Protein backbone atom coordinates (compact mmCIF):
# COMPACT_ATOMS: atom_id res chain seq x y z
CA UNK A 1 0.00 0.00 0.00
CA UNK A 2 1.37 3.40 -1.02
CA UNK A 3 1.88 6.32 1.33
CA UNK A 4 -0.88 8.34 -0.39
CA UNK A 5 -3.45 5.62 -0.07
CA UNK A 6 -2.75 5.33 3.67
CA UNK A 7 -3.68 8.93 4.32
CA UNK A 8 -7.43 9.17 4.73
CA UNK A 9 -9.40 12.25 5.77
CA UNK A 10 -10.50 12.32 9.42
CA UNK A 11 -14.15 11.41 10.05
CA UNK A 12 -16.49 14.35 10.79
CA UNK A 13 -17.68 14.36 14.36
CA UNK A 14 -20.14 17.28 14.18
CA UNK A 15 -19.42 20.88 15.28
CA UNK A 16 -15.86 22.02 15.40
CA UNK A 17 -14.31 22.91 18.80
CA UNK A 18 -14.57 26.62 17.94
CA UNK A 19 -18.32 26.37 17.24
CA UNK A 20 -18.95 24.37 20.41
CA UNK A 21 -17.12 27.00 22.46
CA UNK A 22 -19.16 29.84 20.91
CA UNK A 23 -22.41 28.00 21.66
CA UNK A 24 -21.43 27.49 25.29
CA UNK A 25 -20.59 31.18 25.69
CA UNK A 26 -23.94 32.24 24.16
CA UNK A 27 -26.03 30.41 26.78
CA UNK A 28 -24.38 30.73 30.21
CA UNK A 29 -25.80 28.53 32.94
CA UNK A 30 -26.52 30.03 36.36
CA UNK A 31 -24.65 28.01 38.95
CA UNK A 32 -26.90 25.95 41.21
CA UNK A 33 -25.12 27.42 44.22
CA UNK A 34 -26.37 30.92 43.34
CA UNK A 35 -29.97 29.70 43.04
CA UNK A 36 -29.72 27.99 46.39
CA UNK A 37 -28.19 31.07 47.96
CA UNK A 38 -30.94 33.31 46.56
CA UNK A 39 -33.65 30.98 47.82
CA UNK A 40 -31.95 30.79 51.21
CA UNK A 41 -31.91 34.60 51.54
CA UNK A 42 -35.55 34.82 50.43
CA UNK A 43 -36.60 32.33 53.09
CA UNK A 44 -34.53 34.18 55.69
CA UNK A 45 -36.23 37.44 54.74
CA UNK A 46 -39.68 35.90 55.03
CA UNK A 47 -38.71 34.35 58.34
CA UNK A 48 -37.53 37.73 59.64
CA UNK A 49 -40.83 39.36 58.65
CA UNK A 50 -42.82 36.59 60.36
CA UNK A 51 -40.65 36.83 63.49
CA UNK A 52 -41.04 40.63 63.55
CA UNK A 53 -44.84 40.52 63.44
CA UNK A 54 -45.00 37.58 65.84
CA UNK A 55 -42.94 39.56 68.34
CA UNK A 56 -45.21 42.60 67.96
CA UNK A 57 -48.34 40.51 68.42
CA UNK A 58 -46.92 38.97 71.60
CA UNK A 59 -45.75 42.37 72.89
CA UNK A 60 -49.00 44.19 72.22
CA UNK A 61 -50.96 41.45 73.94
CA UNK A 62 -49.86 43.12 77.20
CA UNK A 63 -48.36 46.50 76.20
CA UNK A 64 -50.42 49.33 74.65
CA UNK A 65 -49.39 49.93 71.02
CA UNK A 66 -47.62 53.31 71.13
CA UNK A 67 -48.70 54.61 67.70
CA UNK A 68 -49.50 53.26 64.25
CA UNK A 69 -48.61 54.28 60.70
CA UNK A 70 -51.90 56.09 60.08
CA UNK A 71 -51.64 58.06 63.32
CA UNK A 72 -48.05 58.98 62.47
CA UNK A 73 -49.18 60.33 59.11
CA UNK A 74 -52.04 62.30 60.65
CA UNK A 75 -49.79 63.68 63.38
CA UNK A 76 -47.35 64.90 60.72
CA UNK A 77 -50.15 66.38 58.60
CA UNK A 78 -52.06 68.06 61.44
CA UNK A 79 -49.13 68.95 63.66
CA UNK A 80 -50.37 66.65 66.44
CA UNK A 81 -53.21 64.33 67.41
CA UNK A 82 -55.41 63.70 70.47
CA UNK A 83 -54.76 60.24 71.90
CA UNK A 84 -55.01 58.90 75.45
CA UNK A 85 -54.87 55.16 76.17
CA UNK A 86 -57.24 53.77 78.82
CA UNK A 87 -57.49 50.21 80.10
CA UNK A 88 -60.57 48.05 79.73
CA UNK A 89 -61.62 48.81 83.32
CA UNK A 90 -61.68 52.52 82.44
CA UNK A 91 -64.18 52.09 79.60
CA UNK A 92 -67.93 51.99 80.21
CA UNK A 93 -69.17 48.42 79.53
CA UNK A 94 -71.95 49.79 77.35
CA UNK A 95 -69.31 51.26 75.03
CA UNK A 96 -67.91 47.82 74.27
CA UNK A 97 -71.38 46.43 73.59
CA UNK A 98 -72.25 49.42 71.40
CA UNK A 99 -69.10 49.06 69.30
CA UNK A 100 -69.75 45.35 68.77
CA UNK A 101 -73.42 45.95 67.95
CA UNK A 102 -72.41 48.62 65.43
CA UNK A 103 -69.42 46.98 63.75
CA UNK A 104 -69.38 43.23 64.38
CA UNK A 105 -72.42 41.67 66.07
CA UNK A 106 -70.93 38.16 65.79
CA UNK A 107 -67.61 39.22 67.32
CA UNK A 108 -67.75 36.49 69.97
CA UNK A 109 -68.67 33.78 67.50
CA UNK A 110 -65.94 34.01 64.86
CA UNK A 111 -62.16 33.48 64.71
CA UNK A 112 -61.36 36.75 62.94
CA UNK A 113 -63.48 36.50 59.80
CA UNK A 114 -67.28 36.60 59.69
CA UNK A 115 -67.87 34.24 56.78
CA UNK A 116 -71.64 34.85 56.74
CA UNK A 117 -71.09 38.61 56.47
CA UNK A 118 -68.48 38.07 53.74
CA UNK A 119 -70.89 35.93 51.71
CA UNK A 120 -73.64 38.54 52.10
CA UNK A 121 -71.26 41.30 51.02
CA UNK A 122 -70.18 39.32 47.95
CA UNK A 123 -73.79 38.68 46.99
CA UNK A 124 -74.54 42.38 47.41
CA UNK A 125 -71.47 43.32 45.38
CA UNK A 126 -69.92 45.30 48.23
CA UNK A 127 -67.35 44.80 51.00
CA UNK A 128 -69.21 47.01 53.44
CA UNK A 129 -69.94 45.24 56.70
CA UNK A 130 -67.61 42.32 55.93
CA UNK A 131 -64.61 43.61 57.91
CA UNK A 132 -64.62 42.40 61.51
CA UNK A 133 -63.31 44.25 64.55
CA UNK A 134 -60.38 41.81 64.58
CA UNK A 135 -59.50 42.69 60.99
CA UNK A 136 -59.77 46.41 61.71
CA UNK A 137 -57.47 46.07 64.73
CA UNK A 138 -54.91 44.15 62.66
CA UNK A 139 -54.99 46.79 59.94
CA UNK A 140 -54.86 49.76 62.32
CA UNK A 141 -52.13 48.42 64.61
CA UNK A 142 -49.80 46.47 62.32
CA UNK A 143 -50.42 47.60 58.74
CA UNK A 144 -51.39 50.61 56.66
CA UNK A 145 -54.63 51.96 55.24
CA UNK A 146 -55.49 51.29 51.63
CA UNK A 147 -57.08 48.69 49.36
CA UNK A 148 -53.95 47.04 47.95
CA UNK A 149 -53.87 43.27 47.57
CA UNK A 150 -50.61 43.08 49.51
CA UNK A 151 -52.20 44.77 52.53
CA UNK A 152 -55.26 42.54 52.29
CA UNK A 153 -53.06 39.43 52.09
CA UNK A 154 -51.06 40.43 55.17
CA UNK A 155 -54.29 41.22 57.01
CA UNK A 156 -55.61 37.76 56.17
CA UNK A 157 -52.44 36.15 57.55
CA UNK A 158 -52.10 38.25 60.71
CA UNK A 159 -55.74 38.37 61.83
CA UNK A 160 -55.93 34.67 62.86
CA UNK A 161 -52.63 35.08 64.73
CA UNK A 162 -54.05 38.03 66.66
CA UNK A 163 -57.15 35.99 67.46
CA UNK A 164 -54.97 33.10 68.60
CA UNK A 165 -52.78 35.16 70.96
CA UNK A 166 -55.08 37.93 72.18
CA UNK A 167 -58.28 37.50 74.15
CA UNK A 168 -61.49 38.92 72.68
CA UNK A 169 -61.50 41.51 75.45
CA UNK A 170 -57.98 42.58 74.52
CA UNK A 171 -58.92 42.89 70.83
CA UNK A 172 -61.88 45.11 71.70
CA UNK A 173 -59.82 47.13 74.19
CA UNK A 174 -57.19 47.88 71.55
CA UNK A 175 -59.87 48.61 68.94
CA UNK A 176 -61.53 51.24 71.13
CA UNK A 177 -58.17 52.83 71.89
CA UNK A 178 -56.96 53.17 68.29
CA UNK A 179 -60.21 53.89 66.42
CA UNK A 180 -60.54 57.33 64.82
CA UNK A 181 -63.54 59.33 66.10
CA UNK A 182 -62.79 62.67 64.44
CA UNK A 183 -59.97 64.22 62.48
CA UNK A 184 -56.93 63.81 64.71
CA UNK A 185 -58.95 62.28 67.57
CA UNK A 186 -58.05 58.66 68.33
CA UNK A 187 -59.34 56.36 71.05
CA UNK A 188 -62.43 56.32 73.19
CA UNK A 189 -60.98 58.44 76.03
CA UNK A 190 -59.99 61.28 73.70
CA UNK A 191 -63.37 60.99 71.93
CA UNK A 192 -65.38 61.10 75.17
CA UNK A 193 -63.49 64.21 76.27
CA UNK A 194 -63.63 65.79 72.83
CA UNK A 195 -67.38 65.42 72.32
CA UNK A 196 -68.96 65.16 75.77
CA UNK A 197 -66.35 66.39 78.27
CA UNK A 198 -66.46 63.14 80.26
CA UNK A 199 -64.16 60.17 80.77
CA UNK A 200 -64.69 56.96 78.83
CA UNK A 201 -65.82 55.15 81.97
CA UNK A 202 -68.68 57.65 82.46
CA UNK A 203 -70.26 57.41 79.02
CA UNK A 204 -74.01 56.85 79.00
CA UNK A 205 -75.75 54.34 76.76
CA UNK A 206 -76.85 57.14 74.43
CA UNK A 207 -73.38 58.69 74.24
CA UNK A 208 -71.78 55.30 73.63
CA UNK A 209 -74.23 54.49 70.85
CA UNK A 210 -73.66 57.91 69.24
CA UNK A 211 -69.90 57.37 69.24
CA UNK A 212 -70.29 53.87 67.81
CA UNK A 213 -72.68 55.22 65.18
CA UNK A 214 -70.07 57.51 63.62
CA UNK A 215 -67.26 54.94 63.43
CA UNK A 216 -67.70 54.12 59.72
CA UNK A 217 -67.30 57.79 58.75
CA UNK A 218 -66.14 59.89 61.72
CA UNK A 219 -65.00 62.86 59.63
CA UNK A 220 -68.46 63.39 58.21
CA UNK A 221 -70.82 62.31 60.99
CA UNK A 222 -71.01 63.88 64.44
CA UNK A 223 -72.34 62.45 67.72
CA UNK A 224 -73.14 65.91 69.10
CA UNK A 225 -74.82 67.20 65.94
CA UNK A 226 -76.33 63.98 64.65
CA UNK A 227 -77.95 63.80 61.25
CA UNK A 228 -81.20 61.92 60.72
CA UNK A 229 -79.15 58.90 59.63
CA UNK A 230 -76.94 59.00 62.74
CA UNK A 231 -80.02 59.28 65.00
CA UNK A 232 -81.57 56.26 63.31
CA UNK A 233 -78.33 54.32 63.52
CA UNK A 234 -77.97 55.27 67.20
CA UNK A 235 -81.38 53.79 68.02
CA UNK A 236 -80.47 50.59 66.18
CA UNK A 237 -77.15 50.33 68.04
CA UNK A 238 -78.77 50.85 71.45
CA UNK A 239 -81.23 48.06 70.66
CA UNK A 240 -78.44 45.84 69.35
CA UNK A 241 -76.29 46.43 72.47
CA UNK A 242 -79.17 45.29 74.66
CA UNK A 243 -79.79 42.27 72.44
CA UNK A 244 -76.20 40.96 72.47
CA UNK A 245 -76.10 41.40 76.26
CA UNK A 246 -79.30 39.38 76.60
CA UNK A 247 -78.46 36.55 74.19
CA UNK A 248 -74.87 36.09 75.39
CA UNK A 249 -73.01 37.49 72.38
CA UNK A 250 -71.12 39.87 74.67
CA UNK A 251 -69.95 37.16 77.06
CA UNK A 252 -66.51 36.76 75.46
CA UNK A 253 -65.40 40.30 76.35
CA UNK A 254 -67.42 41.28 79.41
CA UNK A 255 -66.22 40.69 82.96
CA UNK A 256 -68.80 38.53 84.69
Image: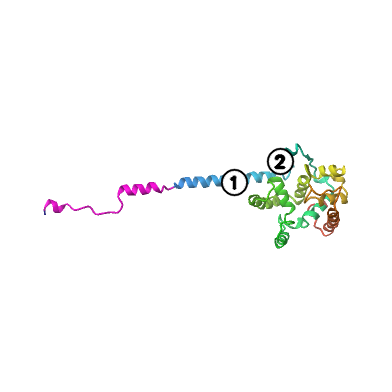
The disc label shown at residue 73, or none: 2
Q: Within the magenta stretch, is there residue 224?
A: no
Percent x, y for residue 119? Answer: 70, 61
Percent x, y for residue 232? Answer: 85, 56
Is 231 situated left or right of 58 in this image?
Answer: right
Q: Residue furthest bottom?
A: 123
Seen at 30% across and 50% down, the residue is 16
Q: Within the magenta stretch, is there residue 23?
A: yes
Q: Nearer the viewer, residue 6 or 169?
A: 6
Residues shaded magenta: 2-29
Seen at 87% across and 45% down, the residue is 202
Percent x, y for residue 94? Answer: 85, 51
Q: Nearer the viewer, residue 21 or 252?
A: 21
At numbered mark 1, what does the secondary structure look like: helix, strand or loop? helix
Q: Residue furthest top?
A: 79
N-term mark: 1 or 2: 1
Percent x, y for residue 47? Answer: 59, 46
Amino acid sequence: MTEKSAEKPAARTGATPRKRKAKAEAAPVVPVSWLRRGLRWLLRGLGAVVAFYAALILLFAVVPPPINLYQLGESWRLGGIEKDWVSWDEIAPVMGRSAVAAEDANFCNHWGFDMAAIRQAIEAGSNRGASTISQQVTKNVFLWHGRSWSRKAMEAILTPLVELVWSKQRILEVYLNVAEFDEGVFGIQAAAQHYFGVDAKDLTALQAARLAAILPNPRVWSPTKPSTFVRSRTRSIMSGAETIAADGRSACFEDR
